[in-house]
Amino acid sequence: MSFIHTPAGRIAECGPQSEAERQTRVDLAAAYRLVALNGWDDLIYTHISASVPGEPGHFLINPFGLAFDEVSASNLVKIDIDGNIVGASEHAVNVTGFALHAAVHAARADAFCVMHLHNTAGVAVSAQPAGLLPVSQHALRFYGQLAYHDYEGLAFTPAEGRRLVEHLADKPAILLRNHGTLTIGRTVAEAYVLMATLLKACEIQLQAQACGAQLVVPDDAVAARTAEQLYDGGAIEGGLEWPALQRKLDRLDAGYRN
């Protein structure tokens, strides 16, 4: 878990939101609500951050202290790369928790959205020496495309940030040993769908291992071919799934859009 630092940066007046920012806010709030709906949240900890379209160096993140099912488009907080609040907000943010996200946002031009969770299955697989095994089609999406970063303690330092992004390289996901999972997306939808796929792969692995039987693993050629097929030439993922997921949320509670 992380600890809170209330930013001391200058508070400026809020300008009008662009349509692109408004849409990003709705998408990001939806991602928080879906995480809560799936039981992937960890009290008030972990984060999903997204870049503000048209505002380089500005990001949106959850108010620290709210549960994920309380996050809405309007209460997301706009911050800069150092975690200082941009504009007026009645909420504080977890600057220490954002530091991990900031390192990835700064290092990767394609990191529009960064999603970090402490899901039980993800943490459990991160603690296994071999990490994620290619024992399911879900896991094969990450065959050769999953990074690993060893645990260094609670406080996330700039030096660790440099090591983490070096380990991440150009991959879309990373297992943080003894800590959790992280995915990046060119859209909020892509980061969410990658995370859903990764967590499903972790859950399948743990259940398959639970019986103690030897696992069937595809050979390297099949695994590589399947991974290439799932990569689909680098197409942005989540485009088809996201509207369906939002319709599901709208049926349950459309308050995230407010």
Image (tube, grey):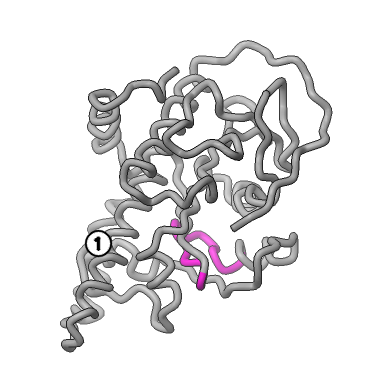
User: How far from the left and from the top, in percent, is residue 85?
Assistant: 72, 31
- Residue that appears at 55% across and 15% down: 18
Residue closer to the observer: 92 or 156: 92
Which residues, given as a range, are shown in magenta?
166-178
Q: How many labels does the image show?
A: 1
Q: In this view, does 37 lie to the left or right of 251?
A: right
Amino acid type of the residue that numbered disc 1 sits on in the rendered structure: His
* Position above or below: 111 against 21: below
* Position above or below: 19 against 177: above
Residue closer to the observer: 20 or 211: 211
* Position above or below: 86 against 179: above
Circle 1 packing at 10 Å, graded few (<14), some (14-19), many (20+), is: many
- Residue that appears at 66% across and 65% down: 154
User: How far from the left and from the top, in percent, is residue 242?
Assistant: 29, 35
Residue 175 colored in magenta in the image: yes
- Residue that appears at 64% across and 29% down: 78
Quadrant of residue 230 in the image?
bottom left
Q: Quadrant of the N terminus?
A: bottom right
Residue for badge 1? 138
- Residue that appears at 39% across and 71% down: 124
Secondary structure beneath disc 1?
A: helix
User: How far from the left and from the top, in percent, is residue 191?
Assistant: 41, 46
Q: In which quarter of the image is the C terminus?
A: top left
User: How far from the left and from the top, in percent, is residue 211?
Assistant: 17, 82
Residue 196 colored in magenta in the image: no
